[in-house]
Amino acid sequence: MKEKKIIYSREEMFKMNKRKLEERGVTLEDIALIAYKQQSKYNPDIELSTCLESVAKILTYRDIFHAVQLGIELDVLTEQGKLSEPMQGILEEDLGMFGIDELLGLSIASNYGVIGQTNFGDIDVNKPGIVGKLNKEGRKGKCHTFLDDIVGALAAAASTRVAQIQSEEYAEHDPSIKQLQMDLKQKK
Ligand SMILES: [Ca+2]
């Protein structure tokens, strides 16, 4: 039997994630916009491009790749009526008491600690931008049971990552912190 490719490089995982999200009507810019809106409340001088960069980075991680691919696959199979009962009906109806979709989202956001989880909760409740759009589409025949949580979690992760980078930059500008000087060239 011919061996199947199941391990992908980070660049391949990024491209596959981007394509899969786009096939389901979500661009990386849509996700970055939510992260930007969330984070600019605390850091008014952040830029959308920084958020977009974070979204792209997050989409290269293996754990996140598996969560994105699995969640979207389940949505697509549900839309095609290919699951068996009881899951076909539960996912088709986006049963509120189901919760495994939120759990998958939470597993993505948890890569960025408690703040990542809190930011995911905020997006889950308020449904900004593309998350709200997916939610509405879900009530009109499309199945976005997993996708809305995946997208919300990616935005939360990106937003938290931007906050972490900002804190790091802020710390570097603190005059009370002495920078480590490592001149590697002189030490042979
Ligand atoms: Ca959902």
Image: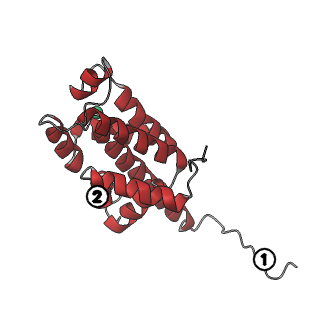
Residues 71 and 162: in front is 71
Q: Choose mark 2 or mark 1, whichever is in front.
A: 2
Residue under the point 37% across and 62% down: 52
Could you say whether the residue bearing mark 1 is in a helix, strand or loop? loop
Q: What residue is disc 2 on?
A: 27
Q: Position of residue 66 (x, y in %)?
A: 48, 43
Residue under the point 32% across and 38% down: 149
Q: Quadrant of ligand 1?
A: top left
- Quadrant where the N terminus is found in the figure: top right
Q: Amino acid at mark 2?
A: Thr
Could you say whether the residue bearing mark 2 is in a helix, strand or loop? loop
Q: Is residue 70 left or right of residue 26?
A: right
Disc 2 beta carbon < 8 A from ligand 1?
Answer: no
Alpha carbon distance from label 2 to label 1: 42 Å
Q: Residues within 10 Å of mark 1 (few under 14, many from 20)?
A: few
Residues 167 and 141: in front is 141
Q: Position of residue 92 (x, y in %)?
A: 23, 28
Q: Is residue 12 above or below residue 90?
A: below
Q: Position of residue 135 (x, y in %)?
A: 19, 38
Among all residues in the image, which is located at the extreme front? 1
Q: Position of residue 34 (x, y in %)?
A: 28, 52
Q: What residue is disc 1 on?
A: 184
